[in-house]
Amino acid sequence: MMEKKASNQTVSKLVQLISCISESRTPMRLQDISENIGVPTATAFRYLNALVEEGLVFQDAATNRYAMTWRICEYGKLVRNHMTIRTLSGNLVSELSVKLSRGVSLVIERGMECVYLDCVYDPTSISGGVPLQRIGLQAPIHAVSSGKLFLTEYQESDIDLLISQKGLVQLTERTITTKKDLMEELRRTKNNKYALDDQECEPGLRCVAVPIYDYSGQITAALSCFGKVENMSFEHIHSDILPELRVVAEEISFRMGYYE
């Protein structure tokens, strides 16, 4: 057990070392590195030598300082090519849908519109047995809960561009169609860290969404839960649905490299 604990600590310190050097704008001294990650200089030296041998770190011959090589970018590129958001989410979307007995969607933004990467639901409980064709579907960003999350990261000039290029199309009698109302809704959404669509996209359906963050801390996707209005009371959303949504969104964010 002690050996396993020591091994875990070594890996943890190696990760801290890589983070430390990566965040530095200039090559670092051995002493500064050891102090930063809280290990003796001899230990830091041993870690650095191992990383140099693997081609991940180089030592400047003139200053004896250390910095990351670009080889680590290769690993990042491979991960981005092979592991999409849909792949990283695995079975989490379908498992959550079963757990909540509601529809659950994984949504991204493309060209100022929302695109559904995944959507799992029981047609008999959502649309009277008629399947909703959502995967691959594009939806107006202002009229769905996921879209409102993406819009919280827009500048006001971006909102103006959205309105001029896409318009605020009215899909139902509840759809937001003015800039003033949209800006107020986005302020609420940003403060709450979740978004609601109360029959704004489809009559009779209510939806709530939470953000998924990537390694840069930006909202890269959204996880939403939807169902009939009578099965999605606001009390039920806050007490039962939001906590479960957030747990899964945090797990996907972690897989996307987000770390608080």
Image (cartoon, rainbow, N blue to C red):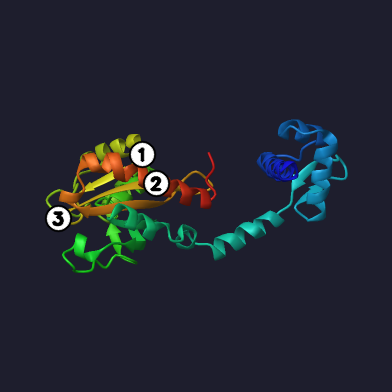
Task: Give the CA distance from mark 1 to mark 3.
Answer: 24 Å
Classify residue 100 as left or right of residue 57. left
Classify residue 207 as left or right of residue 111. left
Q: Quadrant of residue 40?
A: top right
What amino acid is found at the position of numbered circle 2 in the picture?
Pro
Lower sequence index among marks 1 and 3: 1
160 and 183: which is toward the camera: 183
Q: Which residue is mark 3?
A: 203
Where disc 2 sits, the SS reads strand
Residue 60 shows in the view:
yes
Q: Which residue is mark 2?
A: 211
Classify residue 24 as left or right of residue 123. right
Badge 1 vs badge 3, beta-carbon distance below 8 Å:
no
Q: Percent x, y for residue 187? A: 30, 36
Lower sequence index among marks 1 and 2: 1
What amino acid is found at the position of numbered circle 3 in the picture?
Pro
Report the residue that reaches farthest toward the right: 62
Report the residue that reaches farthest toward the front: 1
Badge 3 vs badge 2, beta-carbon distance below 8 Å:
no
Q: Which residue is mark 1?
A: 193
135 and 233: which is toward the camera: 233
Task: Give the CA distance from mark 3 to mark 2.
Answer: 24 Å
Badge 1 vs badge 2, beta-carbon distance below 8 Å:
yes
Tell me the crowding category of disc 2: few under 14, some 14 to 19, or many 20 or more residues within 10 angstroms, Cα based.
many
Where disc 1 sits, the SS reads loop
What amino acid is found at the position of numbered circle 1 in the picture?
Lys
